[in-house]
Amino acid sequence: MDTRHLRAFVTVAEKGNFTRAAIDLAFAQSTVTAQVQSLEREIGVDLFDRLPNTVRLSSAGERFLPYARKILGLTLEARQVSNPGEDLSGTLVIGAMESITSYRLLPVFEFMHLRHPGVRLSMRPSLCLETEEAVRSGSFDAGFVVDARTSIPGLDGEVLCEEPLVLVASPTHKLVGESDLDLSQLRQCRVVSTEPGCTYRDSFEQLLRMPGAEQFPLLELGTIDAIKRSVGSGLGIALLPRVAITTDLDAGNLVCLDWQPPFTVYTQLVWRRGQRLLPALAAVRDAACRVIAEQNA
């Protein structure tokens, strides 16, 4: 099985388009098309459903994609083990929550770009539970997650830090200045949050829910910035990582409320259990450990 054909297939799957894949691979579109067709003939199935302006993975293609990535990863690992002096290279598909990417990981990407320019990081925004499942299935090579568990089924990982959470509101919110807030008071407020699948959001929601009680007001928004703007304008309260709102607290746009969650979450890098770390992924892990240690110093 030709690794060039596998790489063409994986790139088309990621880009959703032969033209964009060809640009990314620096090949003519006809070459990429021919490579994918050759792979399809070899394994005897259509890997894509061809649509007028795009392509999407067929059911066979969805099943085959994790194996293609695994073969490419093992090929790269074998080459680097055989020649340890060779510069790191290859593509890593990594899932991460927006809050981690924006407020924790940018220095990691900068470090990798400067120190290991041959490594291409393909970041996929996804909520923690989605990231964990994608890593288990092989769709992602690794993932940065925030989870209360430090041992996640089917995954190995590195705990990078405890991630402090704070409950915030606008400076004019009725609960500002109140001490020792309890859940009954919080249930009277609209909660602004991410979508389900974010561990700390789901844990907070479970605390606020009461069997048989009326649903507390909840507003789901897609990004941390949208949540912060909504809370700052007085639409509700939000439980967020402190690292994501430090600037807003300093500017006085948001205020911490006197309540601490009865659970702890940890920012972690995870990969599939039993998988030997590719040298490139080991470099990402080491960079993340160093960067986050410096952030928390």
Image (tube, grey):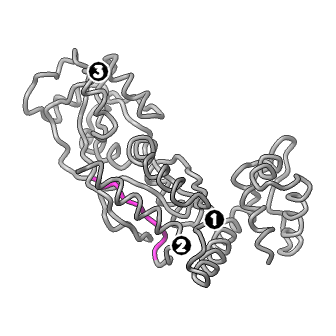
**Front tag of 2 and 3:** 2
- Circles 1 and 2: CB atoms closer than 8 Å: yes
Q: Secondary structure at mark 1?
A: strand
Q: Is residue 249 left or right of residue 192?
A: left
**Looking at the picture, which amino acid does disc 2 mark?**
Leu
Q: Secondary structure at mark 3?
A: loop
Badge 1 or badge 2: first in the primary sequence: 1
| Residue denoted by label 3 | 253
**Looking at the picture, which amino acid does disc 3 mark?**
Asn
Q: Magenta residues?
A: 265-273
**Looking at the picture, which amino acid does disc 1 mark?**
Gly
Q: Is residue 209 left or right of residue 50?
A: left
Residue drawn at (84%, 46%) of the image: 51
- Circles 2 and 3: CB atoms closer than 8 Å: no
Residue 268 located within the stretch drawn in magenta:
yes
Percent of width and height locating residue 231: 33, 23
Question: Residue 247's image quarter?
Answer: top left
**Magenta residues, dominant SS class:** strand
